[in-house]
Image: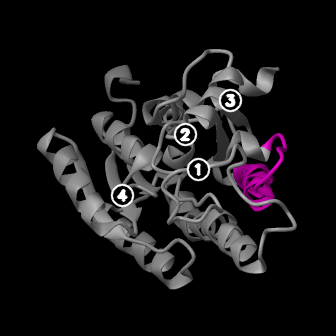
Amino acid sequence: MNIGKRLQNKVALVTGGASGIGAETVRTFAAHGAVVVAADVQDEKGEKLVKEVNASGGKAIYRRLDVVDEVSWRNLVEETVNAYQKLDVLANIAGVSGRDPNVKLQTTIAPGPSIEDTTLEIWNHVMSVNVTGVYLGTKMVLSAMRDAGGGSIINISSICGIVGSHSNAAYHASKGAVRIFSKATAVQHAVDKIRANSIHPGFVDTPMTKPGHSNNEVARVRLDATPLGRFGVPADIAMGCLYLASDEASWITGSELVIDGGVTAQ
């Protein structure tokens, strides 16, 4: 094993790959030798990212992908396998919070609506992107990974998939579903040498959390709840993805990697 290039000769597909945790995962995978397909709906950011990666000596391409579109998933997986003859790693990182995307500054401690204030439209949107997107991605890569002799599926859940809070029940439900879906995938496809694990970030500075972290009161409450005393950064999560994608994690499947600065240890 080449520790310097932990993903040498691997092909990886990363959803949500144009920004935040997804973009940092694209950079990290490429730096460790993987050919990376960055998939997202943020075309300008995605194209800029892969130019950066390629200029740094990595190898990445950007493709537009709506994770709730089954045909788009099928086409992208087929294109990837045709181009690179295999697919070793899927990182399902695309996700939504359930908060109004037009809100630039969170004005309350709670990051999302109560159950009573959650409309069916919000519920369905969150579950569609966060859960159906993971299901479709997993379903579409299984055959390619089986043909390759195995693979690694990494699903980004959240500490909200482990514990509850006073708001945003749709997000909690979606991330809990990702957690248990990962375990089901692990059990059903261990025979194919396909590993599936979930990662559970705590409070990480990303575009998704910026409206909350831009409010000093919200930031203080979250930092007070984090024993290590700082917010996570995308690289903290990307390094967890790297480990689970690598052969170093070859005996790890159906597990939960919590990266939260100690929030859930209390």
Label 3 vs label 4: CA separation?
34 Å
Q: Where is residue 69 in the image (x, y as percent from the top left)?
A: 54, 80
Residue 261, numbered label: none
Residue range of the region highlighted in magenta in the rendering: 162-190
Evaluate if marks 2 and 1 touch, with contact meaning CB atoms under 8 Å apart: yes
Residue 215, numbered label: 2
Q: Residue farthest to the right?
A: 116
Residue corresponding to mark 4: 38
Q: Residues within 10 Å of mark 4 (few under 14, many from 20)?
A: many
Label 2 vs label 3: CA separation?
10 Å
Inspect the image, locate mark 3, and give the three-letter code of the amino acid beneath it: Val
Label 4 vs label 1: CA separation?
29 Å
Inspect the image, locate mark 1, and give the three-letter code of the amino acid beneath it: Gln
**Residue at image location 49% in from the left, 29% down from the top:** 236
Evaluate if marks 3 and 4 touch, with contact meaning CB atoms under 8 Å apart: no
Q: How many labels does the image show?
A: 4
Label 3 vs label 1: CA separation?
13 Å
Q: Position of residue 165 (x, y in %)?
A: 82, 44
**211 vs 50, nearest the viewer:** 211
Q: Does the magenta stretch include residue 167?
A: yes
Q: Position of residue 167 (x, y in %)?
A: 79, 52
Instruction: Establish if 244 lies above or below 119.
Output: above
For marks 2 and 1, the one nearer the N-term is 1
Residue corresponding to mark 1: 106
Residue corresponding to mark 3: 221
Position of the N terminus by quadrant? top left
For marks 3 and 4, the one nearer the N-term is 4
In the image, taking residue 33 as reference, residue 154 lies left or right, namely: right
For marks 3 and 1, the one nearer the N-term is 1
In the image, taking residue 29 as reference, residue 112 lies left or right, namely: right
